[in-house]
């Protein structure tokens, strides 16, 4: 069995949620130490790892990034961690590439840094590592994600993935309880929440922007049906292909929510639970990836860059450190029935191709 599959089989068996990747991080950090990397564990107090290989020669600093966390699914009424976004695959690929790079002596100038980040799904792992200083000396940062089969099949790869910005907005509407026979003495939080849902649905941003805004959770229950409910909670999921579009969308959505609550005398406590920026991708980094894909998979294995309504916390690195040239590619693996599906599976033979592409990138930048 290949080393990549050995890593994958182990990591797949120990799925851990964001910021709780204790066994996962221990396994990866130990393997990197054995391969001769200078390893820092618990970056910024998290499970994050940064490993470094120094050629001893002047040159650029290239960083490769993998995410480590699994998702929490409700299976038969119980919360269960599962690797349904393929981050076990990402970690296996980047770990194997790092190990083979040392064995084959591919870092001839500059330095190679390897980032294993926690909590991609929570949207805060990349921010924690950036705050921990991992990018201060980095010139180029490369990451990747397995793609669903509809987007990119096995044997092909996408040189640049243009992810969308996303935001999760949670709002508590606060009204005033009263007997349902005397509604004029209360303020119905359900009415305020429902009005806000309609107000957001009635927003119209420029048709030239790619965006969506929809309510995804509505909770309201006073416990009895003959009482005016004093509280209601609604969540919205916002998406935009452009960071400018997201800024405008957020402003308009929050105004619609506050206005709806105020119209009925209620108040709205607004929290942004999770936020990811749209892709910020550098042409030079994309060119490195494009050449690496062609070397490994041939011209027929190279697709055009793709846009996706999905989002990726990788782009927080580039939002927070705009001097870093970022590249993010997609690997075909016949992944089905979809990312985040509890039964997600893919062709594991694709992982070896991912290792080859990353090694080709390292040779191009540090060879
Ligand atoms: Zn995911
Ligand atoms: Zn993912």
Image (cartoon, rainbow, N blue to C red):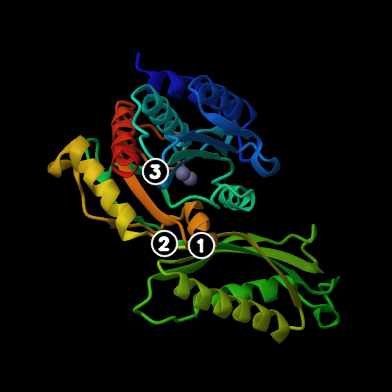
Q: Is residue 33 visible?
A: yes
Q: Is mark 3 within 8 Å of ligand 2?
A: yes
Other residues around mark 2 within 10 Å, as few (<14) / some (14–19) / many (≥20)? many
Residue closest to the eye, 220 or 244: 244
Chain-order first, disc 3 or disc 1: 3
> Which residue corresponds to the image point at 48% horizontal and 39% vertical from the top-left?
113
Q: Secondary structure at mark 1?
A: helix
Q: Marks 3/2: CA distance?
A: 16 Å
- Asked if 169 appears above or below 350 in the picture, the reply is below
> Which residue corresponds to the image point at 74% horizontal and 72% vertical from the top-left?
189
Tag nearer the camera, 3 or 2:
2
Residue closest to the eye, 271 or 181: 271
Q: Residue furthest top?
A: 1
Which of the 4 image quadrants contains residue 188?
A: bottom right
Q: Secondary structure at mark 3?
A: strand
Tag nearer the camera, 3 or 1:
1
Q: Secondary structure at mark 2?
A: loop
Residue indicated by mark 3:
145
Other residues around mark 1 within 10 Å, as few (<14) / some (14–19) / many (≥20)? some
Chain-order first, disc 1 or disc 2: 2
> Which residue corresponds to the image point at 50% horizontal and 33% vertical from the top-left?
83
Chain-order first, disc 3 or disc 2: 3
The disc placed on residue 319 is 1
Other residues around mark 3 within 10 Å, as few (<14) / some (14–19) / many (≥20)? many
Q: Is residue 160 visible?
A: no
Q: Disc 3 vs disc 1: Cβ atoms closer than 8 Å?
A: no
Q: Position of residue 199 (x, y in %)?
A: 56, 79
The disc placed on residue 284 is none
Residue indicated by mark 2:
280
């Amino acid at each position: 069995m290949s080393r990549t599959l050995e890593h994958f089989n182990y990591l797949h068996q120990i799925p851990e949620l964001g910021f709780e990747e204790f066994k996962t991080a221990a396994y990866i950090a130990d393997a990197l130490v054995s391969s001769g990397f200078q390893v820092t564990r618990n970056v910024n107090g998290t499970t994050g790892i940064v490993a470094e290989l120094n050629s001893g020669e002047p040159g650029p600093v290239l960083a490769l990034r993998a995410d480590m966390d699994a998702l929490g699914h409700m299976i038969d009424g119980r919360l269960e961690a599962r690797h349904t976004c393929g981050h076990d695959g990402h970690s296996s690929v980047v770990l194997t590439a790092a190990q083979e790079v040392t064995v084959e002596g591919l870092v001839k100038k500059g330095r190679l840094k390897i980032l294993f980040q926690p909590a991609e799904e929570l949207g805060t792992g990349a921010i924690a590592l950036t705050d921990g200083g991992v990018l201060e000396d980095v010139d180029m940062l490369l990451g990747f994600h397995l793609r669903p089969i509809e987007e990119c099949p096995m044997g092909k790869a996408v040189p640049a993935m243009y992810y969308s910005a996303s935001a999760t907005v949670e709002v508590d509407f606060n009204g005033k309880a009263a007997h349902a026979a005397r509604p004029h003495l209360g303020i119905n939080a359900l009415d305020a929440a429902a009005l806000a849902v309609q107000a957001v649905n009635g927003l119209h941003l420029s048709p030239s922007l790619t965006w969506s805004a929809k309510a995804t959770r509505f909770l309201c229950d006073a416990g009895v049906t003959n009482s005016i409910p004093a509280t209601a909670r609604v969540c919205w999921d916002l998406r935009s292909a452009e960071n400018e579009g997201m800024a405008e969308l957020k402003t308009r959505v929050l105004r619609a929510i506050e206005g709806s609550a105020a119209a009925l005398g209620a108040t709205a406590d607004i929290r942004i639970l999770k936020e990811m920026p749209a892709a910020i991708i550098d042409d030079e980094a994309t060119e490195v990836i494009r050449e690496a894909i062609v070397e490994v998979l041939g011209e027929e294995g190279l697709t055009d860059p793709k846009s996706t309504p999905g989002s990726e916390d990788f782009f927080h690195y580039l939002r927070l450190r705009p001097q870093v040239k970022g590249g993010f590619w997609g690997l075909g693996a016949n992944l089905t029935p979809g990312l985040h599906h509890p039964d997600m599976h893919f062709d594991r033979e694709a992982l070896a191709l991912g290792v080859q592409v990353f090694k080709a990138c390292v040779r191009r930048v540090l060879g």
